């Protein structure tokens, strides 16, 4: 026999009317056990303010959420902490300022004023060299800081994406430096050895650099997939091979500049160089546009494509991915080859852009190793990598001015970069120092531990 009074709220019945709900409340007796009363409360019920208690304002809710251990807050506070520690290092590294601390008990104002002067001047020059100089006059002077920041940012975006993509696939690509080195070699050789018309010449040089990096990433990828050889060891060894290959090829006939006795190659033809965006007097070039395009593509690849799903599945649990029918071997090879391609494009930017127009033993600088820091700071997320590269580019550009105008060692900028990454990798430390709410701390630590 069917029940003539079906329970209200059933998913296959009509909802109870207000009268029925009122009758149901009337039937509830005050002597009902606590457990029975709790079972009548829906599971999705939320805590309401007590009678007479004012509801929290929108501003308070915003501040509460802002001062929580979320990714953005931890990142910003990590930068603040790094700047504070950097300020201490600036003070310690200045002998004149340190001398004022020898009599701080007698005249504390001298030490405080001297410390404030040297730190504020250093960071002011860092800002002026990276973003904007209020005293600048003329278009070139005003846009110069931004131009330098974007010039340093472009190659770091590519190498950062290279490391981040491998992380998402469960691999640790230490070889971005070597992949970028092979990319810069092939891009430069194609830039001065192939007589091609403008446009086509640039495209061929970029493709040559990308293929060189992809080849250097394919090698550890296939070794990992076929033999299980660890990608960290392979990529580190290939870094040395690429560096020594660069030193060797520069002095070979047909590559070395015949008008120079030192180790430098022929200059890249103007037809193969990336066009400058703000005129010949400013160094920013079209490589930054390619970097933004690459960031969008990797974001789409990871989040919108079948290959990206397979890549993330293999990175999370290769055994489960294999059980689901995903080829882990193919994924490893594709991940490392694509990561190498990105690093090769980063290397190409170094010689086809405005940083240099010829091969030298130091042409690639440290963009591959810096890419590891950029990927970590960007949480191995494509758009996060872009923002992290922008920060590192600003530190590099501003550091040059800070060294010239304030006499601060350029190595201090490297220390700041390292401190930022250290604090980013230790969210519990940042949370404890600034007393952040623990709303998302556990989730944040889990994401860092997994590399996601």
Image (cartoon, rainbow, N blue to C red):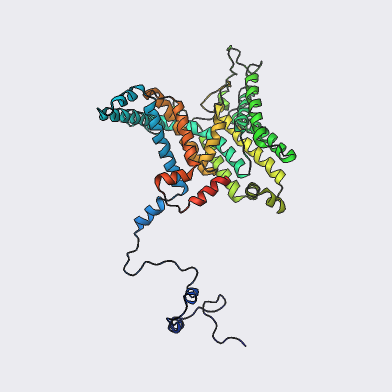
Quadrant housing residue 22: bottom left
Quadrant housing residue 116: top left
Report the residue that reaches farthest toward the front: 105
Q: Is residue 398 left or right of residue 242?
A: left
x, y percentage for residue 41? 47, 73
Vertical order, 100 against 167 (above or below): above
x, y percentage for residue 11? 56, 75
Towards the viewer: 254 or 397: 397
x, y percentage for residue 337? 66, 38
Q: Is residue 357 left or right of residue 413?
A: right
In the rendered image, the quadrant that contains the N terminus is bottom right
Towards the viewer: 358 or 178: 178
For the image shown, how many numbered marks are present on the structure? 0
Residue 273 visible, this orientation: no
Residue 134 visible, this orientation: yes
Query: Measuring 47% from the left and 28% from the top, which residue is drawn there?
Result: 283
Query: Measuring 57% from the left and 77% from the top, which residue is drawn there?
Result: 12
Vertical order, 340 against 271 (above or below): below
Query: Measuring 64% from the left and 31% from the top, which residue is drawn there?
Result: 236
Q: Is residue 73 left or right of residue 238?
A: left
x, y percentage for residue 375? 54, 39
Vertical order, 252 against 333 (above or below): above
Report the residue that reaches farthest toward the right: 226
Towards the viewer: 255 or 94: 94
């Amino acid at each position: 026999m069917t029940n003539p009074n079906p329970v209200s709220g059933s998913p296959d019945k009509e909802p109870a009317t207000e009268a029925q709900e009122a009758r149901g409340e009337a039937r509830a007796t005050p002597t009902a056990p606590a457990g029975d009363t709790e079972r009548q409360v829906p599971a999705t019920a939320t805590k309401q303010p007590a009678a007479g208690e004012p509801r929290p304002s929108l501003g308070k809710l915003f501040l509460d959420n802002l001062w929580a251990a979320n990714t953005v807050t931890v990142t910003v506070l990590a930068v603040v902490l790094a700047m504070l520690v950097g300020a201490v290092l600036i003070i310690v590294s200045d002998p004149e300022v340190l001398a004022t601390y020898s009599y701080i008990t007698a005249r504390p104002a001298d030490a405080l004023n001297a410390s404030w002067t040297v730190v504020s001047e250093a960071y002011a020059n860092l800002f002026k060299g990276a973003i904007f100089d209020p005293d600048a006059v003329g278009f070139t002077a005003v846009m110069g800081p931004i131009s330098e920041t974007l010039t340093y940012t472009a190659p770091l975006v590519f190498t950062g994406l290279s490391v981040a993509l491998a992380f998402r696939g469960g691999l640790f690509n230490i070889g971005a430096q070597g992949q970028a080195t092979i990319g810069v070699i092939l891009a430069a050789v194609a830039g001065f050895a192939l007589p091609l018309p403008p446009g086509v010449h640039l495209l061929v040089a970029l493709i040559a650099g990308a293929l060189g990096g992809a080849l250097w990433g394919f090698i550890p990828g296939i070794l990992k997939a076929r033999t299980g050889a660890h990608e960290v060891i392979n990529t580190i060894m290939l870094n040395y091979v690429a560096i020594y290959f660069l030193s060797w090829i520069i002095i070979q006939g047909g590559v070395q500049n015949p008008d120079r006795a030192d180790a430098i190659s022929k200059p890249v033809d103007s037809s193969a160089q990336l066009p400058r965006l703000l005129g010949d007097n400013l160094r920013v070039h079209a490589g930054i546009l390619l970097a933004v395009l690459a960031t969008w593509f990797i974001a789409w690849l990871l989040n919108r494509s079948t290959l990206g799903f397979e890549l993330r599945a293999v990175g999370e649990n290769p055994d489960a991915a294999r059980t689901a029918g995903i080829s882990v071997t193919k994924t490893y090879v594709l991940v490392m080859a694509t990561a190498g391609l990105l690093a090769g494009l980063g290397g190409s930017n170094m010689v086809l852009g405005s940083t240099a127009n010829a091969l030298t033993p130091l042409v690639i600088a440290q963009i591959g190793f810096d890419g590891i820091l950029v990927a970590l700071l960007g949480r191995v997320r494509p758009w996060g990598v872009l923002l992290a590269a922008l920060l590192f580019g600003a530190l590099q550009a501003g550091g040059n001015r800070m060294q010239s105008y304030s006499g601060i060692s350029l190595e201090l900028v490297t220390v700041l970069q390292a401190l930022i990454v250290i604090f980013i990798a230790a969210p519990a430390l940042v949370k404890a120092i600034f007393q952040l709410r623990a709303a998302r701390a556990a989730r944040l630590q889990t994401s860092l531990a997994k590399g996601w």
